[in-house]
Image (cartoon, rainbow, N blue to C red):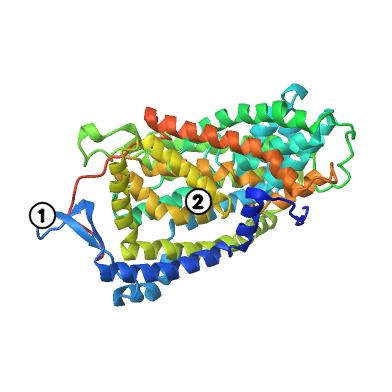
Amino acid sequence: MVEATTATSTQTGILGWVERTGNKLPDPVFIFFYLILALVVVSIIASMAGVSALHPTAIDEATGAALRIDAVSLLAPENIQRLWVEMPKTFTHFHPLGYVLVVMLGAGVAERSGFFAAGMSKAVESAPKALLTPVVALVAMIGNHAADAGYVVLIPLAGILFAAAGRHPLAGIAAAFAGVSGGFSANISPGQLDALLFGITEEAVGASALDPTWTANIAGNWYFITAMTVLFLPIIWYVTDKVIEPRLGPWKGGATAGAADTADVAIPGDEQASKGLRHAGLAALFVIALWLVMVFAPGTPLIDEAACDAIPAENCSIHTQLAPLYQSLVAAFFLLFLLTGWAYGRAAGTIKDHRDLVNMMAESMKDMGYYLVLAFAAAHFVAMFGWSNLGLITAVHGAAGIESTGLPLPLVLGLMVLFAALLNLFVGSASAKWALLAPILVPMLMLLGISPEGATAAYRVGDSATNIITPLMVYFPLILVFAQRWQKDFGLGSLTAMMLPYSLWLLVSGTLLIVGWVYLGIPLGPDAPVGYTLPEMAAPAIAQ
């Protein structure tokens, strides 16, 4: 693997200010720590000031009126006790933790066996010259499931293939970078990012106590991210071929000028790699067939035929009965990645025995070390936000404030996208940003009639669009290294300027997509409507 090196910044103006300001920010783990301290202070002040709100879905059993929610000091004895006594539970019950670790156990094998790299390389290498750009972009977006492999393998490989086709290699790097990072949320199927974001969304819904029946479905944005892929593909194609490559000019460096330093990028073409991909394809078909059997065969466990017995007939749908299927998708992707990676590795020779398989799974957990530390901090921030009642109170008053402005809901979501895109310039971690925003934005949008799936979809549009223009993105220096192999004087400002048209086009088109989606009321995924109706008022089960 190529090591990223830091280039001296030559940027001025707004981008230079973003870089300097962002570099002064502490690590996201400490951002959460400082926010917890600030939250404690705010909770004390809010409690003393008597800040409160009426709960939208809970009634006071004594009076029969809407339940009043008061701000609670985090230094109240019960909250101090809860912090120390429930610390292990607060961490281990953080919903994204289990989702992400399970999916990554399988994805780690698929990545370390070489399956992800071989699949992406073979797909791009086999592309016709006329379709090289869209194939690179599509594989890059699908390659988001491959995590690091998308950056480390596909981006330098795209430069090599463009040069071999007589095209400017920097255009290939730009197209691949735009797909992998600018189209970070776009894909044709859910994966580890969906597990991560919806885990945080579920935590935010649970903390608000607005809808105890709502559970995360990692396929909740499936239709939307597929539409993003369809929309982003021609945009990346157009920007690459009509905007970026003409500016770069004709390539005269030959097909191998920058390939000397790319020995770490393996382009599979031998019989073993091809055999491995065939075996991986058979493994994927096996997993798909297994899940189809568990859905359609008589007496299968993934259809709850009794789900409608306790609810009115008009409220029952096939999606209600398929709830176990949606909830099983985390396990399905774990098994899919695990078996395809194992099948590829056994055929290609990268996995010799079961010990290699176990070691790959263990290595993938080692790579999650930083995420575990971040999740510990984020879990306590989200939980303490809920204990103080400030999240729900802020959401109720925020929703009322937005309603008073008369802004249409699609426009509200559009503004949310722009805010997430701006924040992304300073805080690169997708999970850190959503853990910060979700406790307020998710319940607030629920009160306004937007489902948790809708809030998550809007966030991910803004989160990915500006990835490719911020020097604070962890892979930004690595992409610069790849570009400098072909053009030595290519600097940080050059890379930002090259990627800026992609960022603007993706941000504008993604914003229009989510606004139009909400306006038309199209489902975001299976059993995932964009609109939302609060449940009827019920007696509270809320810890005061």
Which amino acid type is shown beneath numbered disc 2?
Leu
Decide which of 262, 474 is in the foreground and name it. Answer: 474
Q: CA distance from mark 1 to mark 2?
A: 39 Å
- Residue ranking furthest to the left: 63
The numbered dot on residue 64 is 1
Which amino acid type is shown beneath numbered disc 1?
Gly
Q: Is residue 450 left or right of residue 94?
A: left
Residue depicted at x 66% and y 26%: 238
Mark 2 residue crowding within 10 angstroms, few (<14) / some (14–19) / many (20+): many
Q: Is residue 223 left or right of residue 339?
A: left
The numbered dot on residue 469 is none
Q: Height in image: 2 above or below 287?
A: below
Q: Secondary structure at mark 1?
A: loop
Of badges 1 and 2, the one in the foreground is 1
The numbered dot on residue 196 is 2
Q: Secondary structure at mark 2?
A: helix
Q: Position of residue 340 (x, y in %)?
A: 63, 42
Q: Position of residue 375 (x, y in %)?
A: 50, 61
Residue depicted at x 73% and y 41%: 155
